[in-house]
Image: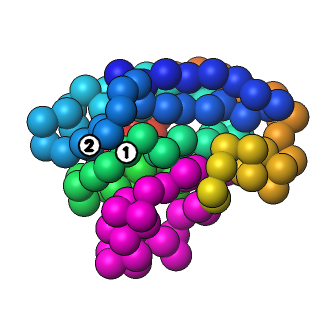
Amino acid sequence: MLRATEKDGFLILKIDGDKVMLDDRNIASFKKELSDVVDDKIGAKIVFDVSNVEYLTSMIIGTLMGVNKKLVRSDGTFYLAGCTDAVKQIFKVTKMDKVFKMVSRVDDAISQGGGHRQIRATKPMPGKSTDRLS
C-alpha cells in the first residue's frame, strides 16, 4: 500500500493506486505501514505525496498529525505534497491546513526543506518507551 523512496535526503512516501480513499476500511493497515516506515526515524525529512488521494477521514488526519508531531519534536520535517482540491478542502474545513506544511509538488518540499540530512534510526533505550502513532 505505502511505497517509500529517497530523493536528495528526503524520504518520499506515496500510496499505491489511483483515486485512493483513506477511510475506515484501510486505517489499520495504513497506520501500521506508516508506523513501520516512520517510527525508527528521527530528524527525518519526509514528504507524503497525496496527489492520488481523493478522500481521507479525520482518523487519517489524526495519524498524520502524530507523524508530524513526532518529526517536529526530533528536528525533522513533514510535508504533504500534491493535495487534490477535495483533500485541500478537508484540511481547510478542519483547519489542519494551518498545522501541516503543504506544497504543490514533492520537488517544492525538497527545494524548501534543505534535504541532505541523513535519516537516522533510533533504538529504544532500556526502560524507555518509544513514541508510537496514536
Left or right of 52 in this view: 115: right
Residue under numbered circle 1: 53
Q: Is residue 26 visible?
A: yes
Residue 97 against residue 124 in the figure, above or below: below
For the view shown, which residue lies furthest in the left direction? Answer: 25
Q: Residues within 10 Å of mark 2 (few under 14, many from 20)?
A: some
What's the amino acid at mark 2? Leu
Q: Residues within 10 Å of mark 1 (few under 14, many from 20)?
A: many
Residue 20 place in picture, x, y as percent: 30, 38
- In the rendered view of the protein, which quadrant contains the N terminus? top left
The magenta segment: 73-102
The one of 121 and 11 positioned closer to us in this rendering? 11
Residue 131 place in picture, x, y as percent: 45, 40
Left or right of 6 in this view: 15: left
Number of callouts? 2
- Give the residue drawn at x 75%, y 44%: 107
The one of 128 and 93 positioned closer to us in this rendering? 93
The colour style of the image is rainbow
Q: Which mark is residue 14?
A: none
- Give the residue drawn at x 55%, y 51%: 82
What's the amino acid at mark 1? Val
Q: Reading the chain from its start, which is encountered first: label 1 or label 2?
A: 2
- Give the residue drawn at x 28%, y 52%: 55
Res 42 → quadrant: top right
Whether tag 1 and tag 2 are in contact, CB under 8 A, the answer is: yes
- Give the residue drawn at x 33%, y 67%: 90
Residue 80 place in picture, x, y as percent: 55, 52
Residue under numbered circle 2: 22
Q: Is residue 132 magenta?
A: no
The one of 70 and 78 positioned closer to us in this rendering? 78
Res 84 → quadrant: bottom left
